[in-house]
């Protein structure tokens, strides 16, 4: 038997398995993102509204229950979400451009 051939086939089989898994994982993540994107835009719209400011001020004045989860009233949390989303869109665009040119994305 040709040792080089067997090693090549084993390497290509590994590449096939890893690529298949990565594509499935990305596909699943994309489906999840498409669902979550609507929720993201809802948060962004709320953050830009007068309602957010009113809720923020109510929190600052101690008018909200102490045990209420209120990360959405944290300017940092929402800002970080918006920034992360913008970076994600840029990265996806880069990946698409590189793929269409047949280049490697690092």
Image (cartoon, rainbow, N blue to C red):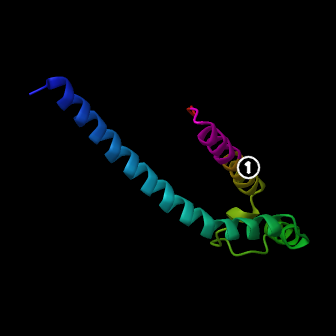
Q: Secondary structure at mark 1?
A: helix
Above or below: residue 84 compared with residue 45: above
Name the magenta segment's main secondary structure. helix
Queried whether the magenta region covers residue 69, the answer comes back as no
Above or below: residue 9 compared with residue 60: above
- Residue 89 relative to residue 28: left or right: right
- Residue 105 relative to residue 54: left or right: left
The residue nearer to you, when weighing 23 against 55, is 23
Tell me which segment is drawn in magenta: 90-103
User: How many numbered discs, if any?
Assistant: 1
Instruction: State the image coordinates of residue 93 (x, y, percent, origin top left).
Output: 68, 46
The residue nearer to you, when weighing 80 against 58, is 80
- Residue 9 relative to residue 19: left or right: left
The residue nearer to you, when weighing 1 against 79, is 1
The residue nearer to you, when weighing 31 against 7, is 7
Where does the C terminus fall, quadrant-wise? top right
Residue depicted at 62% across the width and 72% down the height: 67
Instruction: State the image coordinates of residue 78 (x, y, percent, origin top left).
Output: 74, 57
Residue depicted at 69% across the width and 75% down the height: 65
Residue depicted at 50% across the width and 59% down the height: 27
**In terms of image quadrants, where is residue 51?**
bottom right
Residue depicted at 58% across the width and 32% down the height: 103
Above or below: residue 50 compared with residue 98: below
As drawn, the residue found furthest toward the left would be: 1
Instruction: State the image coordinates of residue 36 (x, y, percent, origin top left).
Output: 62, 67
Q: Which residue is mark 1?
A: 86
Instruction: State the image coordinates of residue 59 (x, y, percent, origin top left).
Output: 79, 68
- Label 1, residues with CA under 10 Å away: few <14, some 14-19, many ≥20: few
**In terms of image quadrants, where is residue 1?**
top left
């Amino acid at each position: 038997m040709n040792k080089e051939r067997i090693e090549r086939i084993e390497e290509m089989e590994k590449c096939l398995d890893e690529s298949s898994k990565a594509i499935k994982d990305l596909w699943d993540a994309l489906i999840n993102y498409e669902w979550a994107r609507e929720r993201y835009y809802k948060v962004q719209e709320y953050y830009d509204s007068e309602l957010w400011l009113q809720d923020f001020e109510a929190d600052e004045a101690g008018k909200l229950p102490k045990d209420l989860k209120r990360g959405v009233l944290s300017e940092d949390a929402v800002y970080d979400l918006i920034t992360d989303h913008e970076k994600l869109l840029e990265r996806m665009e880069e990946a698409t451009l590189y793929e269409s040119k047949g280049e490697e994305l690092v």
